Image: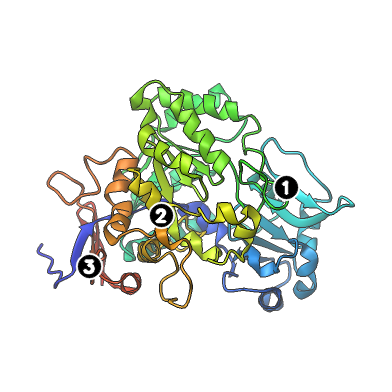
Amino acid sequence: DVVDLAGATLTPGLVDGHSHPYLGMEMATGLDLSACRDLDALRTALADAARAAGPGDWVLAHGLDHNAFGGRPVHHDLIDAALAGVPAFIRLYDGHSALASGPALAAAGIDGPRVFAQRAHVVCDPDGRPTGHLVEFAAMALMDAVLPRENAAVRRERLLGLLRDMAATGLTGAHVMDLQDPGVLDLLADIEESVELPVRLRIAPWCMPGTDTEGLDHLVALQRARGRRWRIGGVKFFMDGTVEGGTAWLEHPDCHGQGTEAFWPDPAAYTRAVHRLARSGVRTVTHAIGDAAVRHVLDTVELLDDPAQRALHRIEHIETVPDSQIPRFARLGVAASMQPTHLAYTRADHRDAWSTRVGKERADRAWRCRDLRDAGAVLVLGSDWPIAHYDPREVLATARLRRLPGHPETEPVAAGQALTGLMALEGYTSHSARSVGEQDVAGRIAPGYRADLTAFAVDPVTAPADEVAAAPVTLTMTGGAVVHRS
């Protein structure tokens, strides 16, 4: 077949460096609250949803910005009246915390603080009563037994539809940062019995604190699992949580005196786990947002004597780091994986929850994409969907603008960290491939490479960034097959 692109610009297939397609479907279920900017808007949206709920229904919601609380502590008392007794579970935008209403807490039997093996907590008031604010995965998991669940058939169709929607934005692949439900692999195999996945999935299952030698060996063995367009490739760790939740690991406390502890209660155990996987040739990716978390991951890699083992690692998010850590990425061969659209939750004047937490000095060094590139690091770009939208055009534009596209009135956040158009494109193509050792088969248009291609109606390198964000995707091809054509 001959495909006439009619003047479109052809690039290597775009790969989202950090995404959660399956977990994201669960996290993005229900009401989208991302447009709520204050408590009045939040209460109105929840009241409308509660009125529409039937007997026994819940209000499930997601995407709520911490800034909507106007500096108040997150508390179910702020929303219970609007819900009129309907239980509600609201995931905050960071994905690491949630707000459960009073009736929801009662349904789950959460009536006081809990002790967890990892850094997680049920936030309580001075009298020991839960506020409804559940911080980190173990705390949110207390709700799992009572939350409504979709059946397998619905999840299958939703996942396939999501991947097709991703392909329509130009994505040919995604680095998937979770495998909480082992049934996902059976689901992918089931889909491939009848159709091809429109997007390649490279999946990194989680390794959580407390994983023993047997668990690590299982993760090594799991690396052999694969289908035609999906495979297990690496292991995901968490070195900390989020700034807004007070669980990012910082060299100095945040404005509330929090942020001084790692997600792994014993950071040395994290180091031992990473080294064991590296000796087995397994790649690792580590969520590290705070400066102390980033430093510890780099220290862990530096302790490896074998350069080949050092080159197996990358760090996700890297929201704030000092000058001293920047050159270590290139020197150690550690790739940086960043999500420019997370800037939407911050402001240039630092009048936002993230910046207030870390203080001006650390906020001034937010998301140092350009410094890492200029220092020679491999820089992978992605969305962290559903934390931000998966559309790569929006990420490409934001990486250049340091603000969301289509909002010229917004002052850029740390404008000096803007990438060039070429650097941004490389973050979705050649650098994405290098970060997972696929530079010999992906990330370029060349004989012998995968026929994963994306065609834009404009040149994504030279066109104005705001135009790139709105540019039609003319064609997406995965493995030589057209999976989207406008």
Badge 2, how many Cα within 10 Å: few under 14, some, many 20+?
Answer: many
Residue 407 higher or lower than 341, as above or below:
below
Task: From the image, tell me which residue sits under label 1.
Answer: 257
Residue type beneath disc 2 = Gly
Does 439 appear above or below 404?
above
Q: Residue at x 12, y 69 (%)?
A: 4
In this view, the residue in front, 8 or 154, is: 8
Q: Secondary structure at mark 2?
A: loop
- Name the residue type under label 1: Gly
- Residue position for label 2: 382
Residue 248: image x %, image y %? 61, 46
Percent position of residue 126, x then y = 87, 52
Counting other residues with Cα less than 10 Å from the Cα at mark 3, is it few (<14), some (14-19), or many (20 or more)?
Answer: some
The image quadrant of residue 378 is: top left
Point out the image quarter for the N terminus. Answer: bottom left
Marks 2 and 3, the one that precedes in the sequence: 2
- Do the CB atoms of the residues marked 3 and 1 lie less than 8 Å apart? no
Q: Nearer the viewer, residue 274 or 27?
A: 274
Q: Secondary structure at mark 3?
A: loop
Circle 3 sits on which residue?
A: 459
Q: In the displayed structure, does residue 91 sit left or right of residue 227?
A: right
Mark 1 and mark 2: span between their CA atoms? 31 Å
Which of pointers 1 and 2 lies earlier in the amino acid sequence? 1
Residue toward you, 358 or 300: 358
Q: Which one is in front, 268 or 150?
A: 268
Vertical comparison of 399 with 450: above or below:
below
**Amino acid at pointer 3:** Asp
